[in-house]
Image (cartoon, rainbow, N blue to C red):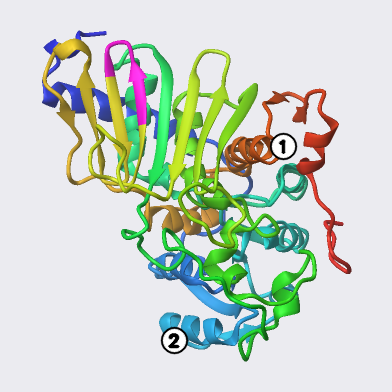
Amino acid sequence: MPDLKELTRRQFFMSSAAGLSAGVAAVESRAWSSPRGANDTVRLGLIGCGPQGTGDLARCLKDPKAQAVALCDVDESRLGQAVKRIGGKLDTYKDFRRVLDRNDIDAVIVATPDHWHAIPALQALSSGKDIYLEKPVGHTIREGQLLVEAVRRHQRHVEVGLQQRSGTIFREAVELVQSGKIGKVSRVHCFNAWSLASGSGRGRSETLENLPDGPPPSGVDYDMWLGPAPKRPFNLNRFHWNYIYFWDYSGGMLLAWGVHLIDIVLWAMKAKAPRAVVTAGGKFAIQDPRETPDTAEMLFEFSDFVLTYSCRHATSFPAGSPRADHGIQFLGDQATLLVNRFGYQIVPEAEQGEPVVSSKDLDNGAGRHQLGFIESVRSRQAPVCSIEDGHRSSTACQLANISYRTGRKILWNPEKEQIINDQEASRFLSKKYREPWSLG
């Protein structure tokens, strides 16, 4: 391997591109089942018409042979907004089962709140439909395990919405790590950081108001929105985007955002699972009704490296880092690589050369990932982010949350997918479901 200080920028990118092309070819060579015709129309249903789900569908429809057929959401206002954005002749439902009953739908996008990911996805697999499944793959580790089993059993195509895997920014960064160009990596650090004043969108960084319980908005089937979650009075703090901050429905910003970063780490480091996880944190910056921490540090122990993840809602940018509210630092013994959705840069160790900055024509995967899903539904090529990939990344984050909720270090058996010698912590691997809902 050439010394970094002797490697010109042109040589650097040419060698990276060659390795990247080989890696992509290896992925694309694995087919699942018989392909369709190249011009076959892929008919889509959307379950969950929030901004993420509607955006996923709109990106899929940039393929001229993708067709939106039906939309489903428990909130009539969101259904109406989605119909207006997507356009065309669309059937609408409040019950996702009516979408799955239709034989004229080839694939569905599941973009519901996290507690509603597994049940529609499992039923979609049983009905013979392919799925674009938003992350995390399940609300619990057990849900992810069942989804992996069901995908293998039904032999359907599932693409997990960890779209950075399709981004040329991240593909190049992963190839650089795996090729050894930054040397031996012994530590990786990920971060998300927002101040109380710099959030983009309601709920990301802003303090939740202390709102009283009350009636749900007109046109909302709140009992269906709760679904398998415990019955409780409606409160706007726990609805739509803000649901991510409550354990009944999600797992905080770690599972809403951090899973994207940890997914790239597992891919780049060719790692399947940590052997131990410990989390420290709490509600230190924001005193509001949320249950998940506003400040947390997570440590993941692997056999040959350590991963840390920092999440906070008090300061916008970590000290000493470029002005980005997220990122991954791969610390090698020859150089450090920092990557985020804006690009990457490599800083050689001990000033052994000039920093290398990624090309501006790279992308972060938004749009490319959804279009890739449509094409792979036709071709039956292996997904860019398989259900196994998504389950592993979700599991790492869920273990960190279990450590936070129990207040202790979690030891993990990756082969058996079991917590070691801790019955109390093992209770969090699954959950109870409110009748009549179940995973069966």
Q: Residues within 10 Å of mark 1 (few under 14, many from 20)?
A: some
Q: Amino acid at mark 2?
A: Lys
Q: Amino acid at mark 1?
A: Thr
Q: Residue 118: tell me if it is visible.
A: yes
Position of the C terminus by quadrant? bottom right
Q: Which mark is residue 84?
A: 2
Position of the N terminus by quadrant? top left
The residue closer to the viewer here, 392 or 247, is: 247
What kind of element bears circle 2? helix
Q: Please report the bounds of the magenta region as a residue range.
A: 329-335
Per the model, the C-alpha gap separating discs 1 and 2 is: 45 Å
Which tag, 1 or 2, sits closer to the chain's start?
2
Q: Is residue 412 magenta?
A: no
Percent position of residue 73, x then y: 62, 78
Could you tell me which residue is drawn at 82 percent across and 35 percent down?
A: 424
Circle 1 is placed at which residue position?
A: 406
Percent position of residue 220, x then y: 65, 84
The residue closer to the viewer here, 179 or 214, is: 214
Q: Which mark is residue 173?
A: none
Residue 31, compared with residue 203, is above or below; it is: above
Q: Residue 95: tell me if it is visible.
A: no
